[in-house]
Image: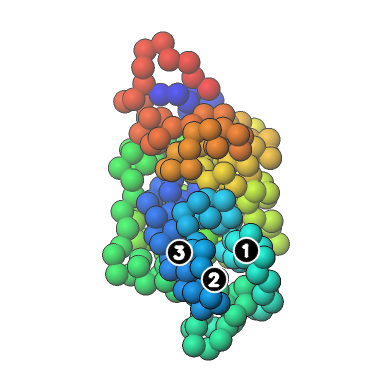
Amino acid sequence: MIVDWSSYRAVLFDLDGVITPTAEVHMRAWAQMFNDFLRGRGVEEPYTDADYFEHVDGKPRYDGVRDFLASRDIVLPDGTPEDPADQAAGAETVCGLGNRKNDAFGQVLRDEGVAAYPGSLRLLEELRERGTALAIVSSSKNAPDVLAAAGVTDYFTVVVHGGVAAERGLRGKPAPDTYQEAARELGVPDESAVVVEDATSGVAAGAAGTFGLVVGVDRGVGHDALTRAGADVVVDDLDELTTAAATPGEEQR
């Protein structure tokens, strides 16, 4: 066990790629939407997984659209969140593309469901038994649906998702606002809370605050990238942070 959990009062988790493997579903939905869009504009260079990690991962949905389009020197009007997702409706706006991606994600979630990572479940159970306060901090407005589909809603006292951030005027990751809001709702000082993230933008959000510890979970972005973004500790799976994984004499944070 790399982390001395008794030193902290709360743990603030990202959701997709940390608790559930839905980051993979998001990746597929983004790829489907962007590549359909690029083909429609006659752009030969496809959207790739590297684009996901560089421009989209962990960010609010419309910010991800803007950042990727900017990387290809494509400018679209922002539009409004009510813009139709249907490509036939001609919603060539940032919001329209974001809504199209969200529809694709929702369809996969309904068709295939989702289960939490076993190692994440073990850590959640251990932390709950310790009495540690737990929160979800996700850029996705789909977070409540994902938590319900995975059967893990009851672990978390607080859920700060993309919809909450928009309603309260909170800046998205890599700004620390949403993590700070979760700690505030839990009644815990930032210094007594741990941030757990798999995206560089989320790790940067944790590092931008005054949190007690920032843990990076490497689901593909790479240990070095997470460390550069500000992670104090990087693991491949949350099971490494459980008591059962402890190594005698191992240094704890």
Task: Choose mark 2 or mark 1, whichever is in front.
Answer: 2
Residue 48 location in percent, x, y?
Answer: 47, 57
Q: Could you tell me the amino acid type at mark 3?
A: Ala
Q: Could you tell me the amino acid type at mark 2?
A: Val
Q: Could you tell me the amino acid type at mark 1?
A: Arg
Q: Quadrant of residue 63?
A: bottom right
Per the image, the residue denoted by label 2 is 43
Q: Would you call the spot at circle 3 few (<14 residues within 10 Å), some (14-19), or many (20 or more)? A: some
Position of 7 relative to 68 (above/below): above
Residue situated in front as seen by the camera: 161 or 156: 161
Q: CA distance from mark 3 to mark 1?
A: 15 Å
Which dot marks residue 72?
A: 1
Which dot marks residue 31?
A: 3
- Mark 1 residue element: loop
Q: Are marks 2 and 3 in contact (CB under 8 Å)?
A: no
- Mark 2 residue element: loop
Position of 233 relative to 205 (above/below): above
